[in-house]
């Protein structure tokens, strides 16, 4: 029996999110893939899998963007069986030492990683 699966952060063909989208589609599930920017490889999957794949533009750091995506999704399906919060962001300062890092970058990264997942839920 197929599931309705939503996977955030699916916009890079070499990334985990995209590959999870592909695996769930191959398994026969209906998948909602969220992206911030266009992804031609997802467009190719949409052509192959048709209505079983829904691609939504959503930025998990922006509550309004998440609410807009949720409203759009509610037109497509009445429930999700599985949510995979995969979307992340890496601070440009991730390789710097404690005293050299820009705290504004770190705050944004924490917002996306922690609060972003809560926004989606």
Image (cartoon, rainbow, N blue to C red):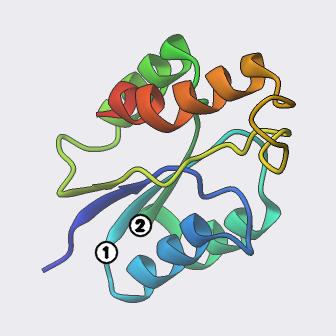
Q: Name the residue tied to disc 1.
A: 29
Q: Is residue 65 visible?
A: yes
Relative to 52, say whether 86 is above or below: above
> In terms of image quadrants, where is residue 37?
top right
Q: Residue at image x 51%, y 38%?
A: 113
Q: CA distance from mark 1 to mark 2?
A: 7 Å
Q: Residues within 10 Å of mark 1 (few under 14, many from 20)?
A: some
Q: Say which of marks 1 and 2 sits in front.
A: 1
Where is residue 47? Give x, y as percent.
65, 71
Horizontal relation, residue 33 to residue 46: left or right: left
Where is residue 52? Give x, y as percent.
41, 66
Q: Residue at image x 67%, y 70%?
A: 15
Q: Residue at image x 43%, y 88%?
A: 26
* Numbered tag placed on residue 52 in the rendering: 2
User: Who is closer to the viewer here, 59 or 70?
Assistant: 59
Q: Are marks 1 and 2 in contact (CB under 8 Å)?
A: yes
> In terms of image quadrants, where is residue 16?
bottom right
Considering the image in quadrants, where does the C terminus appear?
A: top left
Considering the image in quadrants, where does the N terminus appear?
A: bottom left
């Amino acid at each position: 029996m197929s599931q309705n699966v939503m996977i955030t952060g699916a916009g890079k063909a070499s990334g985990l999110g995209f590959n999870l989208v592909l695996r769930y589609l191959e398994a026969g599930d209906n998948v909602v893939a969220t992206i911030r920017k266009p992804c031609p490889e997802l467009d190719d999957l949409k052509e192959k899998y048709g209505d079983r794949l829904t691609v939504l533009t959503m930025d998990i750091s922006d509550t309004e963007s998440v609410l807009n995506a949720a409203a759009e999704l509610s037109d497509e399906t009445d429930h999700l069986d599985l949510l995979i919060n995969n979307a992340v962001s890496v601070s440009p300062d991730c390789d710097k030492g404690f005293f050299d890092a820009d705290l504004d970058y770190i705050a944004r990264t924490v917002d996306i990683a922690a609060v972003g997942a809560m926004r989606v839920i």
